[in-house]
């Protein structure tokens, strides 16, 4: 099974999850520093203070990427390294770090794919309301133009936001991510200001070059667990919240009516001003999709004591793991055909621009065995199935151009700290030794062959 020539095979990481060095070279504090240092927020009290120490081990990691034959590396820029207080002139030392990273990638013929915002908002901006404040959208556009001016000559792919649903709903709606707010109204206004920030940033970057500009959404196909109409309605609420609340403004210039109605008691959407939706729906060059799971939805009212359930608290809906479906170390159901489904839906209902899978991967309870290796066969079969699912979508007309596996290294998995491992490369945190897992060797062969056996 072959992939088109120039298919962009890579891996992804994010600044706070791998860099460490949180107090170096003028970096300011972000909401994740505050959150992870707040007792009870992250498992075991883990923080990103050291993480994978990539800030100090850049050359070693770049060499490893090159050894594995990666064609692309998706990384994010830490906003508080560039603007420690969230506004004003650039901190040169922060820019220097990403300059070294980008040059190091280029020297090894690895395509840099840069994400501007992967959740590490400068704390100073959070103190003034964070994403619930319109000012943050403007500050984000200013930050985007600072980074763009410095790196646009050498970075071809620019992603404004990573997963605005997660920033808005986990951060401001249910509070399990930074900044830890629990208000549906706040999640909605954060959604709008994130998307507006994206639109304003696009504007500011368009003015300065002709790179590929896009955004990354986490999308999940949704289906009801049974044919009970209550489950169907719950599934529609989840689809509205998780998918359409982001896709509709970006590709149709409007918020979905049913979602607005559903959240009527919590928000009148008065944060939307004239002209905002035109900015938000300005054309992008590509869309990034992070795919981890399908949502199989039930109306929780109908089922007491749901096992393995993930509740959408503000939607009166919950997800279940369908019978016979394997789950990952995160408890997430493994359903590769969901990737085909979401890609085809995007193509048919929303857009025909090029698509990239900007994240996909799974957590495994990995360990170093007595021979010194890490045999993660579960990850290999997961990736194999998902690559095939992507290929199926391409056969159905989807213009998929690349695939970034999450993740290059095991890293700080947000609220789960270091307890969950997603890497192709094992990180022994105490010594920071990198041990490529079986999946890394396997992926390297896939890339070399540009296909699957
Ligand atoms: C995504 C995030 C990424 C990583 C994976 C497992 O939601 O974008 O940083 O944590 O999940």
Image (cartoon, grey):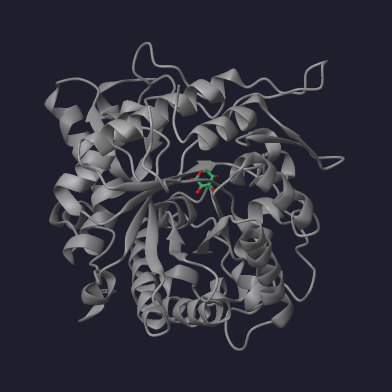
Quadrant position of residue 90: bottom right
Quadrant position of residue 409: top right
User: Going 71% across and 69% down the picture, which residue do you hit?
Assistant: 97
Question: Residue 204, position in %: x, y?
Answer: 40, 82
Please say whether residue 376 is visible from this viewpoint: yes
- Assign the N terminus to one quadrant of the image: top left
User: Which of these two is toward me, 338 or 27?
Assistant: 338
User: Going 57% across and 60% down the picture, which residue do you hit?
Assistant: 76
User: Which of these two is toward me, 99 or 85?
Assistant: 99
Left or right relative to 27: residue 452 = left
Report the label total.
0
65 in relation to 328, above or below: below
Q: Residue furthest right?
A: 431
Question: Residue 220, position in %: x, y?
Answer: 32, 39
Question: Residue 395, position in %: x, y?
Answer: 24, 34
User: Which of these two is toward me, 322 or 298?
Assistant: 322
Question: Residue 11, position in %: x, y?
Answer: 55, 45
User: Going 50% across and 32% down the picture, which residue do you hit?
Assistant: 449
Q: Residue furthest top?
A: 324
- Assign the C terminus to one quadrant of the image: top left
372 in relation to 450, above or below: above
259 in relation to 374, above or below: below
Left or right relative to 131: residue 119 = right
Please say whether residue 47 is visible from this viewpoint: no
Quadrant position of residue 213: bottom left
User: Going 63% across and 65% down the picture, which residue do you hit?
Assistant: 102
């Amino acid at each position: 099974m072959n992939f088109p020539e120039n298919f962009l095979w890579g891996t992804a990481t994010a600044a706070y999850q791998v860099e460490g060095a949180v107090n170096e070279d003028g970096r300011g504090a972000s909401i994740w520093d505050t959150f992870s240092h707040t007792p009870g927020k992250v498992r075991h009290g883990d923080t990103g203070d050291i993480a994978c120490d990539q800030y100090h081990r850049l050359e070693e990691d770049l060499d490893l990427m090159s050894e594995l034959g990666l064609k692309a590396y998706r990384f994010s820029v830490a906003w508080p390294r560039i603007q420690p207080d969230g506004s004003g002139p650039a901190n040169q030392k922060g820019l220097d770090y990403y300059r070294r990273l980008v040059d190091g990638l280029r020297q090894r013929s690895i395509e840099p794919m840069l994400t501007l915002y992967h959740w590490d908002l400068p704390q100073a901006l959070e103190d003034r309301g964070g994403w619930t404040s319109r000012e943050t959208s403007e500050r984000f556009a200013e930050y985007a133009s600072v980074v763009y001016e410095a790196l646009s000559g050498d970075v071809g792919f620019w992603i404004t936001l990573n997963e605005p649903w997660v920033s808005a709903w986990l951060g401001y709606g249910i509070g399990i991510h930074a900044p830890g707010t629990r208000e549906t109204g706040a999640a909605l206004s954060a959604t709008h200001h994130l998307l507006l920030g994206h639109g304003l940033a696009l504007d500011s970057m368009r003015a300065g070059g002709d790179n590929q500009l896009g955004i990354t959404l986490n999308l999940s196909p949704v289906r009801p667990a049974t044919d009970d109409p209550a489950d169907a309605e719950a599934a529609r609420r989840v689809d509205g919240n998780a998918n359409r609340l982001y896709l509709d403004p970006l590709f149709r210039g409007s918020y979905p009516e049913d979602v607005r109605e559903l959240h009527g008691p919590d928000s009148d959407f008065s944060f939307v001003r004239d002209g905002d939706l035109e900015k938000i729906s300005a054309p992008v060059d590509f869309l990034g999709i992070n795919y981890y799971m399908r949502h199989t939805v039930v109306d929780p009212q109908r089922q007491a004591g749901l096992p393995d359930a993930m509740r959408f608290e503000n939607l009166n809906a919950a997800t279940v793991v369908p019978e016979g479906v394997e789950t990952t170390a995160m408890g997430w159901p493994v359903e590769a055909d969901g990737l085909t489904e979401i890609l085809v839906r995007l193509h048919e209902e929303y857009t025909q621009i090029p698509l990239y899978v900007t994240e996909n991967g799974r957590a495994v309870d990995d360990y170093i065995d007595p021979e010194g290796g890490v045999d993660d066969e579960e990850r290999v079969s997961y990736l194999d199935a998902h690559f095939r699912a992507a290929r199926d979508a391409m056969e159905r007309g989807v213009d998929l151009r690349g695939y970034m596996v999450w993740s290059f290294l095991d890293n700080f998995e947000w609220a789960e700290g270091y307890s969950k491992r997603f890497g192709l490369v094992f990180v022994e945190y105490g010594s920071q030794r990198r041990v490529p897992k079986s999946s890394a060797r396997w992926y390297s062969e896939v890339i070399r062959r540009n296909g699957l056996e």
